[in-house]
Amino acid sequence: MSQLADKPSIMANNMTDTITKPNSSNDSAPSLEQSRNTAGQSWFNRSIPGIKQQLTAPLTAVETEPSTKCSSCHSMITNTALIFNGYVCPHCDHHLPMSARERLNWLLDTVDGELGQEFTAKDPLRFVDSKPYPARMSEAQEKTGESEALIVMYGKLRNLDVVTCAFDFRFMGGSMGSVVGDRFVQAAEKALEDNVPLVCFAASGGARMQEGLLSLMQMARTAAAIERLRIAGVPYIVVLTNPVYGGVTASLAMLGDIHLAEPKAMIGFAGKRVIEQTVRETLEEPFQRAEFLLEHGVVDEVVHRHQLIDTIYRLLAKLCRVPNVDAQ
Ligand SMILES: [Zn+2]
C-alpha cells in the first residue's frame, strides 16, 4: 500500500496517544498527572484541558518533495526516485511515460546535436475543431516546452554513433503532422549519410487530423526513407512504447529491422473499442498489449526498461559488426 495511504492510520494512532481527555472531576484545575506531563513542555506546547491536541507525525518524502502518482498502483513516488528508476514504479513495476527529450538523454551517453528544429507547422487547411489548429499548437508547445511531437538527436550510445528520435505523446497525442515527417526523414537521411543506425521510440495516437492529407502523406514519406536505409544496409530499430496507434503503426513503427516493446504497451492500428464495435465481440486483455503482439509475431522482444539500453546497444553492435560485444 502507498505511503500516503498508510498515513491516516499512523496519524490516528498518534492522535489516540496524545489527545488530552477532559478532566471529568474538575475541568478548571489540571490533575496531578497532567501537571507532571506538561512540566517539561514550554507554555506554547502545553496541552489545555478540554482541547484536543494533535501531534503532527514527521512528514514523509512524498509530502515534502515534488511527487508523481503511479497510474497503475496509485502510490506516490518522489520525482527524484522516479528519475533514478527510469520512470518505472518501484512498487508495481509499471512503466510510466517518459518525455521525448528525457528518453533520448537517458539513452545517449553523449548528445552531439539535435536535428529538425528549423521545421515549423503550417495551417494549410485553416482547420478549426473546438479551437483553431494554431491555438492548439501553441497550447501543446507551452505544455511540453517542445516545438513539435518528434525530437531527433544524434550522439553516442557507449562506443557507437547513433541517430535517435522519440515521439512526445504529451504533444497533441504524439500525432504525425508534416513536421514530424520532416524530422523523421531528416533523421533517416543523417543516419544514411553517416552510415550509423537509427533508433526510434514510438508513442503516438496516429496521424494529425488537423493537417488532413498532408499528415497521411507522411506515412509514405517515412516509409520511403526507411526503405532507403534498408537498401543501404543501415540498421533501424523501433522501440514501441505505450501507446502506438493509427498512422504511425501503419508506417514507421512497423518497418523496423527489429521491433522491441516496453511491457504492457498498447500497440495497434484502430483502438480496441472501435474493433469491438465493428466485429461485435468483446476483446479480452491482453489484446493489443505488447505481450500479446509478441505471441503473435508482431514484436520481436518485450524488454523491461531497465534492460532496454543494454538490449539496444547489443543489437546495434551485432548489426554493426562490433567485435567482442558479448564480452562487454
Ligand atoms: Zn505503481
Image (cartoon, rainbow, N blue to C red):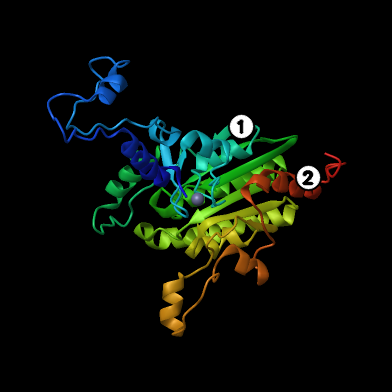
Which amino acid, mark 2? Ala
Residues at discs 2 and 1 in contact (Cβ within 8 Å): no
Question: Compared with residue 99, is residue 219 higher up or lower down, i.e. above or below?
Answer: below
Q: Name the quadrant of the C terminus.
A: top right
Residue farthest to the left, as pictured? 28
Residue at (23, 35) in percent of width and height: 21
Q: Nearer the viewer, residue 278 or 264?
A: 264
Q: Residue at x 14, y 30 (%)?
A: 26
Image mark for residue 119: none
* Residue 188 in view here: yes
Residue 200 position in % (x across, y down): 60, 50
Is 21 rendered above or below residue 293? Answer: above
94, 191: nearer the viewer = 94
Determine the residue located farthest toward the bottom in the rendered image.
280
Question: Which residue is label 1 attached to?
Answer: 111
Corner quadrant of residue 157: top right
- Of residues 84 and 251, the one drawn nearer to the viewer in this rendering: 84
What is the crowding at mark 2: few (fewer than 14 residues within 10 Å), some, or many (at least 20)? some
Residue marked by disc 2: 317
Residues under labels 2 and 1: Cα distance? 18 Å
User: Disc 1 residue type?
Assistant: Val
Instruction: Of the two numbered discs 2 and 1 on the same chain, state the one appearing first in sequence.
Output: 1
Label 1 element class: strand
- Percent of width and height locating residue 248: 52, 60
The answer to whether any part of residue 120 appears in the image is: no
- Relative to 129, is 15 above or below? above
Q: Position of residue 166 (x, y in %)?
A: 54, 46
Binning the other alpha carbons within 10 Å of mark 1 as few (below 14), some (14 to 19) or many (20 upward) gives some
- Against 123, residue 58 (above or below) is above
